[in-house]
Image (cartoon, rainbow, N blue to C red):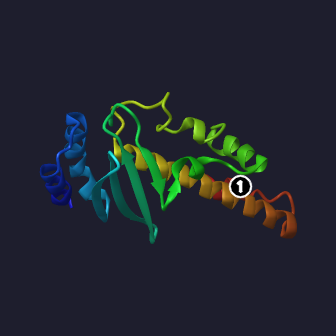
Amino acid sequence: MENQIMEYINNEKINSKFLLKRLSKESEKFSERFKSISLVYQNKKYLLYMEDKINYKYNKYCFILNENYPFSPPMLEINNIPYKQFLISKTQKYNKLMKQMSGLECMCCNNILCNDRWSPAITITKIVDEINIFRNYKKNIIYKIMIDKIKDKYLIFDIDLDSWLFQ
């Protein structure tokens, strides 16, 4: 897969030497982590499509890189959903649990793709690592909500399921 990216980089006229250098460096790590990778130039932007397999589920990432990358953050879609939408919480209960379980007020304000938190040193693999961390937070919050409903309906209140499940 590394060769596919390198072939594209060599065949295409990438205008930004910074983008060219970054993609060629990162392509080595891509082949280790992702099942499929493709790079497309469209509307003066580079679309980097990647697919990985986590827990029997395929995740598709689309990184939209402009000519200023890595000096400006990429835009991102996960399974055709904008990353910002993936991060936004829907309810007050969810926000309260997010703060309890992770210490974060909200994921949207604490992600590395925000303009104030972005640094050129952040790589695409670091972004995917952050996505996986946030995905685990969301999964644990959903489990917590379901456990609370089960406890309220079927169990007595002195059973501490939280400490057993979220060690």
**Residue 13 versus residue 142 in the image, above or below:** above
Find residue 65 and report its horizontal and vertical position in percent: 35, 44
Label 1 SS: helix
Q: Residue at x 20, y 38 (%)?
A: 21
Amino acid type, callout 1: Asp
Q: Is residue 108 left or right of residue 147?
A: left
Q: Nearer the viewer, residue 123 or 165?
A: 123
Figure disc tally:
1
Q: Residue furthest front?
A: 43
Find residue 106 and report its horizontal and vertical position in percent: 64, 40
Find residue 44 and report its horizontal and vertical position in percent: 32, 45
Q: Residue furthest top?
A: 116
Q: Nearer the viewer, residue 97 or 153?
A: 97
Query: In which quadrant of the rendered view does residue 70 lie?
Result: top left
Q: Residue at x 47, y 54 (%)?
A: 77
Q: Which residue is identified by label 1?
A: 162
Query: In which quadrant of the rendered view does residue 152 lie?
Result: bottom right
Q: Residue at x 71, y 51 (%)?
A: 90
**Residue 11 versus residue 120 in the image, above or below:** below
**Residue 123 versus residue 150 in the image, above or below:** above
Quadrant placement of the N terminus: bottom left
Find residue 146 and report its horizontal and vertical position in percent: 73, 63
Q: Residues within 10 Å of mark 1 (few under 14, many from 20)?
A: few
Q: Nearer the viewer, residue 110 or 61?
A: 61
**Residue 163 versus residue 119 in the image, above or below:** below
Q: Residue at x 74, y 44 (%)?
A: 96
